Amino acid sequence: MKFSFKIGTIMGIPIKLHITFLLILPVFAYLFASAPEPYGFLEVEALTMRYTLSTLTALLLFVSILLHELAHSYLAKRYGVSIESITLFLFGGVSSMEEIPRKPSQEAKMAFAGPFVSLVLGLFCLILYEYFIFPTPEFLKNPAFRIIWILGVLNVVLGIFNLLPAFPMDGGRVLRSLYARKMSYIKATQSAAAVGKFFAILMAIFGILIGNLWFPLIALFIYMGATEEERSTQASVTLENVLIKDIMTKTVISVHPSMSVEDLVHFMFKNKHMGYPVMEGGVLKGIVSFTDVRKVPPLERPVLLVRDIMTKEVLSVSSSVQAHEALKLISGKNIGRVLVIDDGTLVGILSRTDLVRTLRLMSE
Ligand SMILES: [Zn+2]
C-alpha cells in the first residue's frame, strides 16, 4: 500500500503503519478521553493522566487488531501462503498475501483464526476484570484498570463483527468455504457475495429505520466489498484457463538507451504503447514507461536519455505459464506491464490492458 512505512518485523512479516492510521489514532484517543465511565476516562480530572490513559487504550486497541491479523498470517504461512506485509490503517488491519488457499478447510481455518483470537483476547480481558479486578479495593482508586474492560468489550465486538457472514469480513470467507465444499469456487464466491449483499441491504434499511446513519455507511462498505471479491475471484479464476503466450503482444517494439526522453515522448505518441523494453545490441537493459517520463520536467526532456530514467530491475514471466501469474505480478507490484522472457530471450510483452481485454472477451 502507498503512504505506509515499516515499524518492525514479526514472524518474518514486515509490519507497516499507513498514514491514515496516524490520523485515526488521536481521534480514538480523544474519543476515549471524552467518553464517561466505563468506556472512557472523562471523570479523570488531571488532563495529562486522562490523555495518557486514553492514548494507551487506543494504542492497545491497535495492538489487538495487529494480533488479529497475525493470527490470519500465522495459519496462512503454515499453509504455504507468503505474506508480503501487514498494514495498520484507518479501519483496522490488512494482511497483504498471495493467493488465498482454494482448499475450503484451509480457507475456513485461516479466516476464522482472526476473529477467534479477538474473541479469546476479549473474553480473557473481561473475565480478568470482572473476577479479579472489579472485586478488589484498588479498583476504585485506579482508573487504569478500566483499560482492561474497554479492550475486553472492543475485542469481543471486533470478533463478532468480523464473523458477520459477508465479504470483506472474515465471516464472508468462512461462508464461501462452506459453499465451496458443494460447488465450484466461482459459484461459491457468487453465493457468499449474494448473502453479503442481502445482509448489507438489510443493515442499511435497519439503520434508516432506527435513524442511525452508521449502519447504512457500514452496509455500503460491505456491499462494495462483496462486489469487489466477486469481481477479483472471477478475474483470477478466468485467467487460470489462459496461457500468457496466447494473449501477449508478440511484436515487441523496443527503444535504445541513448534515445532522448523528448524523442521517447514522440515515439510513444506514434506507437501508442505506454511502455517499452530498452534494448542495446540485442541485450535487455531495462524497461521505460509513461510513468517514468511523467516524472521528468518538460525542460529536461531534451537532455535526459532513456537510460537515465528507465527501470533497470525488470519483472518478467515465462510465456508458458497461466495469465493468472501475470495478473498477480502486475497487481501485486502495481505496475503497468511485464515482459515475457523465455530462456533469456524477450518474446513478448503483457500489459494490464491486455489482461483487462482478455477478461472482457472471456466474460462475453
Ligand atoms: Zn480478520
Image: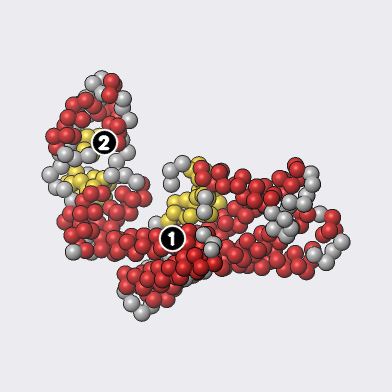
Q: CA distance from mark 2 to mark 1?
A: 35 Å
Whether residue 286 can be seen here: no
Residue at the far right: name it. Answer: 137
Viewer-closest of 315 and 95: 95
Q: Residues within 10 Å of mark 1 (few under 14, many from 20)?
A: some
Give the camera-side residue of 7 and 356.
356
Residue type, numbered disc 2: Phe
Q: Is residue 250 left or right of residue 173?
A: left
Label 1 near ligand 1 (CB < 8 Å): no
Query: Which residue is at 55% across, 51% downward?
Result: 10
Three-letter code for the amino acid on which mark 1 is drawn: Leu
Q: Is residue 332 visible?
A: yes
Q: Residue at x 55, y 44 (%)?
A: 23
Q: Is residue 312 left or right of residue 93?
A: left
Horizontal and vertical percent position of residue 348: 18, 46
Judging by the rendered image, the residue that carries numbered circle 1 is 220
**Position in image of residue 360 (x %, y %):** 21, 58
Furthest residue toward bottom: 182
Which numbered disc, 2 or 1, marks the residue that appears first in the sequence?
1
